[in-house]
Amino acid sequence: MKTNYSLQTFKGDFFGGLTAGIVALPLALAFGVSSGFGPVAGLYGAIAVGLFAALFGGTSTQISGPTGPMTVIFAAALVSFPDNAPAVLGVVFLAGLFQIVMGYLKIGVFVRYIPYPVISGFMSGIGVIIILLQLHPMLGAPGVGSPLEAVLTLPQSLSTFSTASLFLTFFTMAVVFFTPPKISRSIPSPLLALVGGTIIALVLKLPVETIGHIPSGLPEISLPWFPIELLPKIVPMALALSVLGAIDALLTSVVADSLTKTRHNSNKELLGQGLGNIAASLIGGLPGAGATMRTVVNIKAGGTTRASGIVHSLFLLAILLGLGRLAAHIPLPVLAGILMKVGIDILDYRLLRMVKRIPRQDLTVMLTVFAITVFIDLIVAVGVGITLASLMITYRISRQADIEVTSVLSEEWHQDLEKSLEEETDHGIRTLSISGAFFFGTTAKMQEQISKLIGTKVVIINCFNVPFMDLSGYYALSEMIDRLKAEKIKPIVVVPEGIGIRRQMMEMGYGDLLGPDGIHTDFNDALHLAWEYLEDR
């Protein structure tokens, strides 16, 4: 938790966690029912995984709990071990243990190398899934389990729609979309919509579906003892559950980073997720992972620290201890309206606005991941996206390969000049030289160099030996420039001539970011400009 924690921060965390908890409540109950273990098991899992992941995880704004992919494997375990609850919970226990081991082995860092088009397609796909799954509750029809089913059964729901449900959904959306910022800063608009919509439904006695009865009472704690002869069958399922949960959680961490402009600790996050799943297995709960939708709800409602995740779990615990009677009256169309706003907000408008200007290969990856995320499977989408991006980047690198024999390497004079330049100006001017392809695999290294540049006056980012840049490279460079400017450091970029990097930069808005004199194709020109800027200061 931040050392400068304030009342305003707590207010955001409280409302963020509370709103996320309200959204998580029906989802946890639904996952519990669909798994076959009972609705209260979903609630137990949401409390345990959510609390331990918030306390010990590495993503400050992440909300964890039962998710669709995790519930599917848990249901498969229930089928494999019928009438053997200890064996089923043993799968969850071992999965949590495996996640802790993965964290200690530092496997989580590999998620940082997921290309931006994959993340973009995944985020936009999640947004569309949220919207499609809320269409039926909005119309007053029973909820469906998949986006494809939502599309196929939509005509039937349209023919029998409920006017009361539509009214409540549109009222909720009007509140969350049009509440003035002055009000929403004090009370988040989703919470206003939730309370207002519930009161309207109760006062007018509208015939709409509500969350309904919620089980109460604390769970019993017990170790999931199972016969040792079942271990060969349990271990593979636990491994699958642990890997799926790790991917699910770390992808959500990446989404949270994108929304909050922060950076998570992947290995610490795996530790928190593992402890959460072990805790869930001890109280008979469903396994869980980082939940993208609930995390976005938390962030949008004001959550900024791990306290929001703790509030989310405490709210669900309060439901178990007796507040379920109040939450039972919340109309499902009101939740649908809130989630519609979440789905619309999570779409990656940053990339969509430049869809005609980004490299075609990156667009292909993004659209492929988007389609598979919406209509097939989230985890499959990421796997296919990473594979496709890797194949394309390998192809582009091979096209750029060139062998040239010269008596003196062309870059040596640059290195000597840069060294003497830094010494003569007392590091007032520094150069950051990038050689080779600047793509998603090298952006993380570039971000690590920023701290070394703090305190200088001018930075020449020398991309003269960069044969090409992909979308992740362009975004990483723009973020670096933003950070340098925030530190009052003048950035100047040098790019090679004739291979399209300068043109692509101008199309993507680098002219406005760097100014008319910020991009050069000649190192000497950039050097003279740096000297002039230093002398003017």
Image: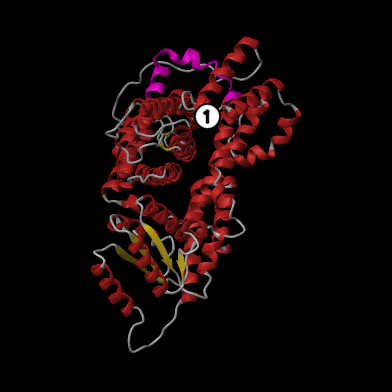
Please name the residue that numbered disc 1 is placed on. Answer: 181
Q: Who's the residue at 54% across and 62% down the image?
A: 506
Q: Does residue 218 lie above or below 458 as drawn? A: above
Q: Residue furthest front?
A: 536
Q: Does residue 133 lie above or below 328 as drawn? A: below
From the image, give the main secondary structure of the stretch colored magenta.
helix
Q: Position of residue 170 (x, y in %)?
A: 65, 26
Q: Residue furthest bottom?
A: 407
Question: In the rendered structure, which amino acid carries the disc numbered 1?
Answer: Pro
- Residue 435 visible in this rendered orientation of the protein: no
- In what element is the residue under mark 1? helix
Q: For mark 1, does the 10 Å Cα neighbourhood hold few (<14), some (14 to 19), or many (20 or more) residues?
A: few
> Residues in magenta?
312-334
In the depicted view, which residue is nearer to us: 509 or 324? Answer: 509
In the depicted view, which residue is nearer to us: 402 or 73? Answer: 402
Q: Who's the residue at 23% across and 68% down the image?
A: 423
Q: Position of residue 427 (x, y in %)?
A: 26, 63
